[in-house]
Amino acid sequence: MANHILFQITFDCNLDCPFCDIKNRKREVDVDACMANIKKKAGEIEWVYITGGEPFLVDNLADVCDELRNAGFKVGVTTNGTIFRPEIADHVDRIGISIDGDREFHDKGRGEGVFDKAIELLEIVNDKCETVVMSVALKDNQDALNRLKPIVNKIDPAYWQIQRDYYDNSVKIAV
């Protein structure tokens, strides 16, 4: 039995990453209906992970997180780290920030200055809640992940989650 639910709270995103198709799937999310369904799983499910799009674009995100925590869930939020809402850390148990590699690699895929914003947010919230650096191992970012390693080690998040590219089983994780 799974112990978590992924709650895609929005399809909106402030970035336009070439590898992401979220904007092609854009539709409205009925947050109230989703919350009602999630709450039915209280006592069965431990974690609710809020994803997007970019969840930090949701105005009432803190209220949603509080409501889920009051219902007995642990709450995690995944962000690209570019929208500064560090107060969200007071309303969640975990924040995951997507970082694809070192500054050069990350900014090439997500936009200039995105790496520095993500690292800055990670540093700000690292002492407020559990933090996770979330990376995907691709054929072309192995060196960039190795260059990211000392930065991650210095910040010392709770976890560095590196997952293999879903579409390419030949990718090896070698960090």
Image (cartoon, rainbow, N blue to C red):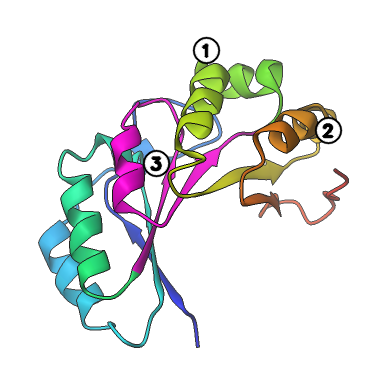
The answer to whether residue 111 is above or below residue 158 is: above
The disc, 2 or 3, on the residue closer to the chain's N-terminal end is 3
Q: Which residues are magenta?
A: 74-100
The outermost residue toward the front is 127
Q: Position of residue 151 (x, y in %)?
A: 72, 28
Horizontal placement of 9 versus 32: left or right?
Answer: right
Q: Secondary structure at mark 1?
A: loop
Q: Position of residue 10 (x, y in %)?
A: 27, 46
Residue 113: mark: 1
Q: Position of residue 9 (x, y in %)?
A: 27, 52
The residue at which mark 3 appears reads as 22
Nearer to the camera, 153 or 107:
153
The answer to whether residue 4 is above or below residue 115 is: below
- Residue at left offset 21%, top offset 74%: 71
The disc, 1 or 2, on the residue closer to the chain's N-terminal end is 1
Q: Is residue 34 shown in magenta? A: no
The outermost residue toward the left is 32
The outermost residue toward the top is 112
The residue at which mark 2 appears reads as 146
